[in-house]
């Protein structure tokens, strides 16, 4: 074999080796790229919520995914993490459902692209219950949430008192991020309050020579008085009748607020000297006693027109409304008689149970 033939064979073998290498490299690279971008690398059969409570590494993430029953390969996840450069994952709440590529999945968590969570605010609650409820739904403590209502700098910024701010915590279901701060929560609710209340009712309220704060304070009283939705405009009308006639509102809920608890009131409770005691003080109390619902606020903006100025509870959970004190006394006696009967029935039942033990 001559030199020319030998060189020709070497070139051919070299070319074959290079092509083989390129083929294997491209096949491996293509396979890896396919695995990285494959839409079925991670499968979540059941819609789940992944909570990362603090900045997490890959081991933490694997643990959280295992806890949720997510179908994935830990080795492939580790390999993908190294290849893509995503090695730490941000605190937050992430909704998972269906299939994901490693590329999409890891980038979402590493960049902290959270999914909002529903946050429910109930009507007619107090600041403590509000703070506890929020702390159960997002990552804030009850104490942090409560502190917002005594943060003088924040209240000054909003130009609101603690009671006025809480009265604006409009009951609704909001979408918020799990990592929202207490100020984020309050500002989000205030935007909704302004849109649903201030923007809608300001003109009507001004025509009545009132302010939004006046209406909100009245609505907070109606919120605690009304057990039946249909009664809200009637109760609102009754209290506005008292207010417009220069009478004391004599609203039991304001006494409950002053005492700091909701319970059946005693005679001496009505003598409690407090700015919110509407049996002793004329006009509206200094601010809202709770956070009224939108329907209660609307009923306070548009009260039913009538001549009622008295009401007393009835056995059905509602009220009997009257125009004169004489009528009120008659209905009050009926209510007291019914209560006495209920107490007798209760005592008799307790006595029978004691005998049967």
Image: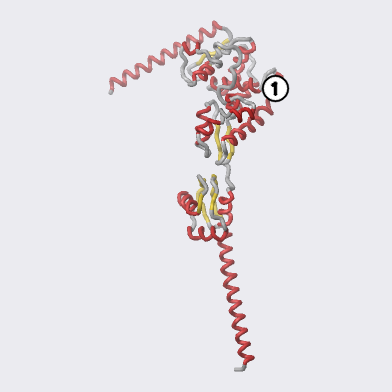
Residue 198 picture quarter: top right
**Residue, x 55% and y 7% (percent of image)?**
325
x, y percent for residue 114: 58, 46
Q: The N terminus appears in which quarter of the rendering?
A: bottom right
- Up the image or down, 163 lies above or below 282; here it is below
Residue 247 appears in the figure: yes
Question: Is 93 situated above or below 235?
Answer: below
Is 318 located above or below residue 19 in the figure? above
Give the image quarter of residue 353.
top left
Q: Position of residue 89 (x, y in %)?
A: 54, 50
Quadrant the C terminus occupies: top left
Q: Which residue is the site of mark 1?
A: 204
**Closer-to-camera residue (76/152):** 152
Which quarter of the figure has residue 204? Answer: top right
Q: Residues within 10 Å of mark 1 (few under 14, many from 20)?
A: some
In the picture as drawn, the residue positioned furthest to the front comes out as 153
Q: Is residue 101 visible?
A: no
Residue visible at 52% across and 54% down?
Answer: 43
* SS class, disc 1: helix
x and y percent of residue 337 in the render?
44, 11
The residue drawn where x is 50% and y is 54% is 58
Q: Is residue 112 above or below residue 310?
A: below
């Amino acid at each position: 074999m001559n030199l020319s033939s030998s060189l020709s064979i070497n070139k051919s073998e070299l070319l074959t080796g290079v092509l083989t290498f390129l083929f294997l490299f491209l096949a491996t690279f293509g396979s890896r790229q396919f695995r990285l971008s494959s839409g079925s690398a991670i499968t979540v059969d059941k819609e789940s919520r992944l909570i990362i409570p603090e900045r997490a590494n890959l081991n933490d993430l694997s643990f959280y995914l295992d806890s949720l029953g997510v179908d994935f390969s830990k080795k492939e996840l580790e390999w993908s993490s190294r290849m893509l450069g995503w090695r730490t994952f941000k605190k937050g709440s992430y909704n998972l459902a269906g299939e994901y590529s490693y590329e999409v999945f890891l980038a979402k968590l590493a960049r902290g692209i959270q999914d909002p969570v529903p946050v429910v605010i109930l009507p007619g609650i107090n600041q403590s219950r509000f703070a506890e409820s929020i702390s159960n739904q997002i990552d804030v403590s009850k104490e942090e949430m409560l502190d917002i209502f005594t943060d003088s700098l924040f209240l000054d910024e909003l130009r609101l008192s603690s009671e006025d701010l809480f009265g604006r915590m409009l009951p609704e279901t909001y979408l918020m991020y799990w990592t929202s701060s207490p100020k984020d929560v309050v500002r989000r609710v205030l935007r909704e309050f302004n849109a649903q209340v201030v923007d809608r009712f300001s003109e009507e309220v001004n025509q009545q020579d009132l302010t939004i704060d006046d209406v909100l304070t009245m609505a907070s009283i109606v919120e605690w008085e009304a057990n039946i939705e249909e009664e809200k405009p009637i109760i609102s009308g009754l209290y506005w009748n008292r207010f417009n006639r220069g009478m004391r509102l004599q609203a039991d809920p304001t006494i409950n607020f002053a005492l700091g608890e909701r319970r059946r009131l005693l005679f001496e409770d009505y003598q409690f000297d407090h700015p919110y005691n509407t049996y002793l003080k004329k006009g509206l109390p200094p601010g809202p006693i709770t956070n009224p619902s939108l329907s209660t606020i609307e009923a306070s903006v548009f009260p039913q027109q009538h001549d009622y100025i008295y009401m007393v509870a009835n056995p059905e959970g509602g009220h009997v409304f009257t125009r004169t004190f004489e009528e009120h006394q008659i209905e009050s006696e009926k209510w007291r008689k019914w209560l006495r009967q209920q107490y007798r029935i209760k005592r008799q039942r307790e006595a029978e149970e004691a005998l049967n033990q």
